[in-house]
């Protein structure tokens, strides 16, 4: 192995660097460029963006190569990071997968389910690693709390954001709620039985505030609310399950838990206990509140993608995960359209 070069030893014993290129250098794309340069196992080949002036500025400021086309960047890379607007995800990803290159693609996976199904097929044919950028899976508060969440029976989420024109090209469901849809699906291991939803378009052409109720076959119910016209930002999820309540603040990186544990023998006189009767005995109530250790969630997801390539393991957020979250998102969108149509009919009838 050459001295002074950050080569990677793969699962088959060979040494190499993972060459990665970035498609799209908007706000998030520039963050990806910076973080990729901080990961020793990755070699940033460059980027492509159709905005020539923006590309020239980034090249001058950061000294990163701007490719003249998507195809040139793909050919020069082992992996491609797609950070383009959602409506372009499919066309970009198709080009990457047809060249059998590893793919990191921002959420949502694609704009339509039809496109997502095509990508699933192409990814299987290409036999490459694909990771979808559901970054909240790497939020330190969620990582710290995830092991305590088992078989939740009721989930409540609130994801509220102050208005920002960036992202209004899609519904708030695909822009914000899809984060919580993915988190819920990662914790509830059951099929969906029923979905109901309603939403209102306030400042854009698509719903800006939405509430959805997802019912699962195992009895779990998830109530999700997302808004991009809030006066303050909020990203909280609450999980209720047998003998436990777990609250996750994704924004402030805080966790609160209330847990019940069976007590045997003599109890601490200062402990808070509850007597459930002769059959169930006494349980002690434990309160825990802590702030999670900070991390850079975007960097961590890019590192996990890198490790999946190196060690030939499954990505932590698979293309199937991305498809499932998108599928539920579109069910919610369809339910909103139905609810809106019914309301309009009722108003006309009055």
Image (cartoon, helix red, strand yellow):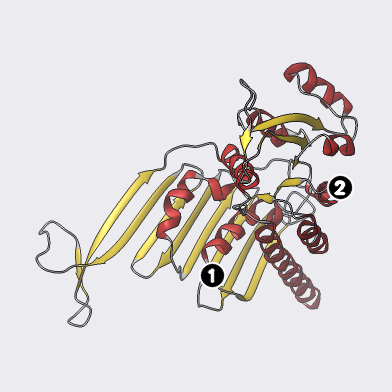
Judge by depth and name the residue closer to the eye, 118 or 327. Answer: 118
Q: Residue at x 46, y 43 (%)?
A: 253
**Picture coordinates of residue 302 (x, y %)?**
63, 40
Query: Within 10 Å of the Cα at label 2, are there few (<14), some (14-19), or many (20+) other Cα atoms?
Result: some
Please report the residue visible at 56 percent of the width from the left and 75 percent of the height from the top: 216
In the rendered image, the residue lying farthest to the bottom is 279
| Image quadrant assignment for residue 245 | bottom left
**SS category of the residue bearing label 1:** loop
Instruction: Tell me, for residue 112, which label it has, or none.
Output: none
Q: Is residue 200 visible?
A: yes
Cα distance between the residues tagged 2 and 1: 33 Å
User: From the viewer's perspective, is 292 left or right of 82?
Assistant: left
User: In which quadrant is the C terminus drawn?
Assistant: bottom right
The quadrant in which the N terminus is found is: top right
Q: Mark 2: which secondary structure?
A: helix
* Marks 2 and 1, the one that precedes in the sequence: 2
Closer to the camera: disc 2 or disc 1?
2
Instruction: Report x, y in % for residue 160.
Output: 58, 49
Where residue 248 sits: x, y (%)?
A: 45, 52
Pick whichever, 216 or 340, lies toward us: 216
Is 282 left, or right, of 139 in this rendering? left
Q: Position of residue 273 (x, y in %)?
A: 19, 65
Instruction: Classify 42 as above or below 153.
Output: above
Residue at image coords 46%, 59%: 238
Density class for disc 1 (Cα within 10 Å; few <14, some 14-19, many ≥20) is some
In-image side of 253 versus 66 (left or right): left
Q: Which mark is residue 189?
A: 1
Vertical side of 324 occupied by 308: above or below: above
Residue 333, relative to residue 217: is it above or below?
above
Q: Is residue 161 visible?
A: no
How many badges with numbers are in the image?
2
Which numbered marker is on residue 95? 2
């Amino acid at each position: 192995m050459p001295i002074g070069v950050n080569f990677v030893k793969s699962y088959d014993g060979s040494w190499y660097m993972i060459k990665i290129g970035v498609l799209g250098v908007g706000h998030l794309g520039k963050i990806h460029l910076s973080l990729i340069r901080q990961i020793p196992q990755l070699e940033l080949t460059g980027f492509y963006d159709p905005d020539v002036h923006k590309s020239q500025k980034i090249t001058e400021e950061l000294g990163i190569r701007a490719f003249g086309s998507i195809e040139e960047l793909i050919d020069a890379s082992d992996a491609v990071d797609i950070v383009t607007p959602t409506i372009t995800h499919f066309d970009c990803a198709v080009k990457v997968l047809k060249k059998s290159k590893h793919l990191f693609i921002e959420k949502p996976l694609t704009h339509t389910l039809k496109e997502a199904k095509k990508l699933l097929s192409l990814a299987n044919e290409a036999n490459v690693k694909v990771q979808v950028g559901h970054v909240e899976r790497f939020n330190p508060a969620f990582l710290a709390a995830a092991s305590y969440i088992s078989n939740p029976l009721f989930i409540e989420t609130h994801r509220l954001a102050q208005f920002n024109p960036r992202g209004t090209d899609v519904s708030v469901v695909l822009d914000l709620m899809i984060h919580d849809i993915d988190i819920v699906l990662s914790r509830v291991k059951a099929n969906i039985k029923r979905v109901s939803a309603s939403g209102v378009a306030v400042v854009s052409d698509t719903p800006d505030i939405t509430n959805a109720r997802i019912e699962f076959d195992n009895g779990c119910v998830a109530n999700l609310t997302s808004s991009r016209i809030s006066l303050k930002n909020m990203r909280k999820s609450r999980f209720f399950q047998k003998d436990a309540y777990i609250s996750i603040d994704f924004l402030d990186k805080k966790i609160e838990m209330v847990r019940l544990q069976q007590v045997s023998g003599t109890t601490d006189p200062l402990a808070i206990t509850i007597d459930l009767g002769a059959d169930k005995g006494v349980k002690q109530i434990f309160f825990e509140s802590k702030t999670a250790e900070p991390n850079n969630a975007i960097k961590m997801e890019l590192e996990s993608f890198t490790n999946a390539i190196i060690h030939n393991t499954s990505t932590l957020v698979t293309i199937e995960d991305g498809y499932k979250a998108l599928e539920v998102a579109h069910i919610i969108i369809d339910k909103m359209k139905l609810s809106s149509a019914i309301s309009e009919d009722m108003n006309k009838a009055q």
